[in-house]
Image: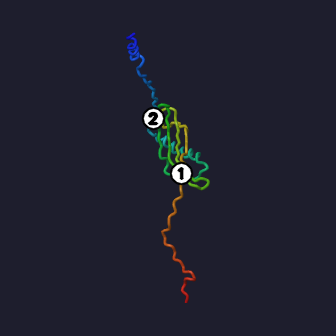
């Protein structure tokens, strides 16, 4: 009986008192977009197609002004989903029917299932959005820099003679 206590203690130390082993969590790695060389035919397609897509989102706005064109035209491939993307983004200004001049950002994206490097890729519209639309504040008025015209003296100020 004298050995029963130390034996139980020894069994607990060997078998049952070990700290739990943490389970390993499987990490999901999302494959990032990989840039594709921008084919000149894709760039021309994007330049020709994006204004109509943006205009359809801005209606009934008038006088759309894209400035010098899009800020970004890029092609990417997303391996984990196996899709190629063609994206155009930039800024546009327009006049609302109320006469207020507006500024907004835009993004238009087309896709193609699979990896492509063909100039004649049949891109399909995936999404188009106008974001952060806000009025453009009117320019501040500037003080006149020309001298005021000389004033004529009033009849009461004229010398009487």
Tag 2 residue: 32
Residue 160: give its label.
none
Q: Is residue 156 above or below residue 135?
A: below
The mark tally for this picture is 2
Quadrant of residue 13 in the image?
Answer: top left
- The quarter of the image holding the N terminus is top left
Quadrant of residue 156 in the image?
Answer: bottom right
- The quarter of the image holding the C terminus is bottom right
**Residue furthest out toward the front:** 2
Secondary structure under tag 1 reads: strand
> Given contact means CB atoms under 8 Å apart, are the residues at marks 1 and 2 in contact?
no
Q: Distance from label 1 to label 2 (Cα)?
A: 31 Å
Q: Is residue 153 above or below residue 58?
A: below
Q: Is residue 2 above or below residue 85?
A: above
Report the side of 65 relative to 5 (left or right): right
**Residue furthest out toward the bottom:** 161
Q: Position of residue 140 (x, y in %)?
A: 51, 61
Mark 1 vs mark 2: which is more N-terminal?
2
Residue found 61% across the figure and 53% down from its top: 97
Residue count near mark 2 (Cα–Cα under 10 Å), binned few <14, some 14–19, many ≥20: few
Q: Position of residue 67 (x, y in %)?
A: 50, 51
- Observer-nearest of 82 and 45: 82
Tag 1 residue: 103
Q: Position of residue 157 (x, y in %)?
A: 55, 82
Secondary structure under tag 2 reads: loop
- Observer-nearest of 15 and 4: 4
- Observer-nearest of 151 and 87: 151
Report the side of 33 relative to 124 (left or right): left
Residue found 48% across the figure and 31% down from its top: 80
Residue found 47% across the figure and 47% down from its top: 71
Residue count near mark 1 (Cα–Cα under 10 Å), binned few <14, some 14–19, many ≥20: many
């Amino acid at each position: 009986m004298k050995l029963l206590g130390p034996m139980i203690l020894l069994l607990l130390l060997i078998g049952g008192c070990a700290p739990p082993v943490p389970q390993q969590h499987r990490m999901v790695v999302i494959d990032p977009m990989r840039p594709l060389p921008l084919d000149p035919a894709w760039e021309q397609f994007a330049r020709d197609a994006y204004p109509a897509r943006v205009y359809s989102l801005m209606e009934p706005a008038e006088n759309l002004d894209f400035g010098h064109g899009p800020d970004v035209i890029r092609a990417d491939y997303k391996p984990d989903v196996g899709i190629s993307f063609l994206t155009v983004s930039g800024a546009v200004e327009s006049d609302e029917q109320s006469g207020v001049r507006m500024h907004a950002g835009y993004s238009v994206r087309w896709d193609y299932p699979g990896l492509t490097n063909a100039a004649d890729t049949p891109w399909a519209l995936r999404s188009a959005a106008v974001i952060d639309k806000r009025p453009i504040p009117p320019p501040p008025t500037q003080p006149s820099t020309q001298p005021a015209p000389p004033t004529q003296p009033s009849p009461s100020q004229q010398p009487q003679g």
